[in-house]
Amino acid sequence: MNGLGGLNKSPAGVVVGLVQLQLPVIKNRGDITRQASRIVEMVAKARHNMPTLDLVVFPEYALHGLSMDTSDEILCTLDGPEIASFKAACVEHHLWGCFSSMERNPNGNPWNSGLIIDPAGEVKLYYRKLHPWVPVEPWEPGDLGIPVIDGPNGCKLSLIICHDGMFPEMAREAAYKGAEIMLRTAGYTAPVRDAWRFTNQSNAFCNLMVTASVCMCGTDGTFDSMGEAMVVNFDGSVIAHGTTGRPDEIITAELRPDLVREARANWGVENNIYQLGHRGFSAVSGGATDCPYSYMHDLVAGRYRLPWENSVRVTDGTSCGLPAPGRAFTPPPAIAAQ
C-alpha cells in the first residue's frame, strides 16, 4: 500500500518523490551551473506534481554526470553556490530534498557526498560515500560513518549511495542506528539492474526497513543510466517501481514509518535485525549475544583477509585508467576509536 503514490496521504505517512533525472554531460563550470539550475527546476516540478510531497530525492551524479572527472574546476563545496541554490529551492517549495555532489577534498581525491536539506534550508544529513564503486570510481572513501536523522513527519531517515547498497552491512548499520527509511541514490547502468532490484529488497526485508532508491536515467551519449526508481516496504514487497526508463519521471510513494515501528516491536518470526544479537532465544534466555562471525572480528582488528586474497587481481584503479594510489587511508579519530 502506498496511498496511490501519495495522493491519499495518511497522518503518519511520508510521501517521497524519486527523480529519474536525465543524465547530463558535464565538461566545465558553466555546465555545473546550468545543471544546478535544472535540479532546482525539478524541485519545483516535484512540488507541483504532488502537493502532498514531503521529500524529493535526486540520484547520485545528478549534478556532475558520469564522467568521473576530478578536475578542480567542476568540484563543489558545502558553502558553494550550487548547494546554496538547493537550500533555497527547499525553502521556496517547503520540501525536504536529497542531493548529490562531488566535493572538493583539500587533502586527496574528491568525496562523493550526499546531503539532505530540510524545508528551512538547513543541512540535516551530510554523508560521504563509504564504498566507491572500485575500480571505476576515483572518489576518496568516506570517513563520516552512516548518519541517521529525524526526517519529515518524525521518521528516522538515512542515506547511502549506489555501491554502498551491495554491502548488507551498510543497510544493517543504518537500521541498527534507528533508520526506518533508507535512501539509496545511484548512477547505475543496465548491467546492474537485477542486483539493484534484489539488494533493494533484501536490504529492506533483512532490517524491517523501507528502502527508497533511484538512479540517473537516459543517456549522455556514452553511458546509459537506468532510472529504476524503487520503493520497497519493510516486508520486502515492492510498492513503487519506475520501469519505463523515462528520463525526468518522478516516481512517488507514501511510506509508513509507523508500520515499520509496529513490525519491529511485534514481529517474532523474521525479526532478523533483533534476532542477530539474540540467537536462539527460544532455547536460552535472551538468546546468545556473542559475535560468532570471524570477518567482523578480523575487520575490527585490521586483519580482514580472504582465503583467496592472493588470487585477487584487481586491487587498484589502474585497469580503468586511474593512477595507482600512493598513500594510505587514515580514518578520523572519531571513527578510528569505534
Image (cartoon, helix red, strand yellow):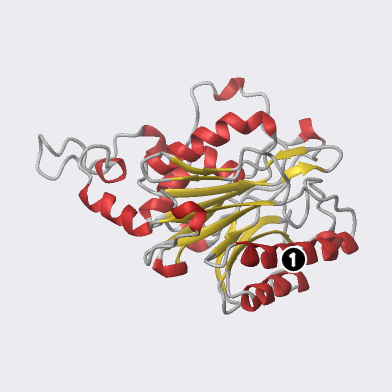
| Left or right, residue 317 beside residue 161 | right
Q: Where is residue 215 in the image (x, y as percent from the top left)?
A: 65, 45
Per the image, the residue denoted by label 1 is 41
> Would you say residue 299 is visible in this rendering?
no
Q: Residue at x 58, y 57 (%)?
A: 17
Q: Where is residue 71 in the image (x, y as percent from the top left)?
A: 85, 55
Mark 1 lies on a secondary structure that is helix
| Left or right, residue 106 beside residue 335 | right
Quadrant of residue 143 within the rendered picture: bottom right
261 or 237, which lies in front?
237
Q: Residue at x 43, y 37 (%)?
A: 202
Above or below residue 49? Residue 315 is: above
**Mark 1: few, some, or many residues within 10 Å (few <14, many ≥20)?**
few
77 or 106, which lies in front?
77
Q: Residue at x 27, y 37 (%)?
A: 270
Q: In which quarter of the image is the C terminus?
A: bottom left
Quadrant of residue 66 within the rendered picture: top right
192 or 297, which lies in front?
192
Quadrant of residue 31 within the rendered picture: bottom right
Q: Where is residue 132 in the image (x, y as percent from the top left)?
A: 64, 44
| Left or right, residue 162 beside residue 167 | right
Q: Where is residue 56 in the image (x, y as percent from the top left)?
A: 59, 61
238 or 78, which lies in front?
238
Amino acid beneath label 1 = Glu
> Would you say residue 284 is visible in this rendering?
yes
